[in-house]
Image (cartoon, rainbow, N blue to C red):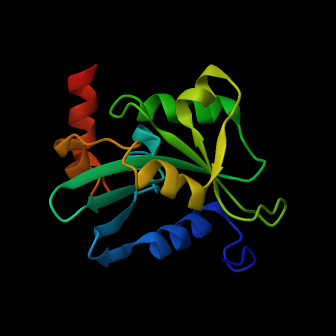
Amino acid sequence: MPVERFAQEPHYTTALIAVLQGTAYSGPLGRVEFISTAANDRGSGSAESWSGVDFAITAQVSDGITTIDKVIFFQAKSAGRFDTVKLDEQIRSMKKFTRAPKVIEVPSVRRRIPEPVVYSGNRFLLRSVRSRMMLSDYIVARVLTTLDGDTRPKVVTAAQSSSLEQLKIIAQMQS
């Protein structure tokens, strides 16, 4: 995706999740579908302001017999532009309702990277060595294998609305 056409992080992120949306595979071995949700990000009460989420990807992975629905929550940052104090706060907000928040670094005009890179939000908070994976590798290694993602039905359902309103209730119940 040409960064010149989507030069700011919110625009690149929206274009990215639009491309990810849809059926990735449907055949004799099963089905893989991705459902993208952009969190509302305007105004003081917006979903991003209280949840830390920029977007969620729900993966529906089926082998034809069993279907697993998993949602992964992401906070997006422009490449090379990590305000660690604010990002820490956003990750902590996400941890109120999911165990494994993710940070995705997207290309920018100032710093071009071949494709978006995914980091563990938990490792970012610990300041441990940041293991990073290109988005395509992350999807194959962690999402399709169903290693990453939140499978709790109420969380998966809550991630299907841009307001993420139901996640507030889940966060309050876990506090």
Q: Quadrant of the C terminus?
A: top left
Res. 27 image quadrant: bottom left
Viewed as shown, does residue 170 lie left or right of 133? left
Q: Quadrant of the N terminus?
A: bottom right
Work out which residue is located at the far left of the displayed protein and give it.
65
Q: Is residue 128 above or below residue 105?
A: above
Q: Position of residue 18 (x, y in %)?
A: 46, 74
Residue at position x 48%, y 28% in the image: 92
Residue 6, located in which quarter of the rendered image?
bottom right
**Is 57 in front, or is 148?**
148
Residue drawn at x 54%, y 73% is: 15
The residue at the point 21 percent across, 40 percent down is 152
- Look at 31% across and 54% down and name the residue there: 163
Spot occupied by residue 12 in the image (x, y as percentages of width and height): 61, 68
Residue that sits furthest to the right in the current view: 110
- 116 displayed left or right of 168: right
Q: x%, y% of residue 24?
A: 39, 74
The image position of residue 67, as x and y in percent, is 20, 57
Left or right of 121, for residue 71: left
The number of discs equals 0
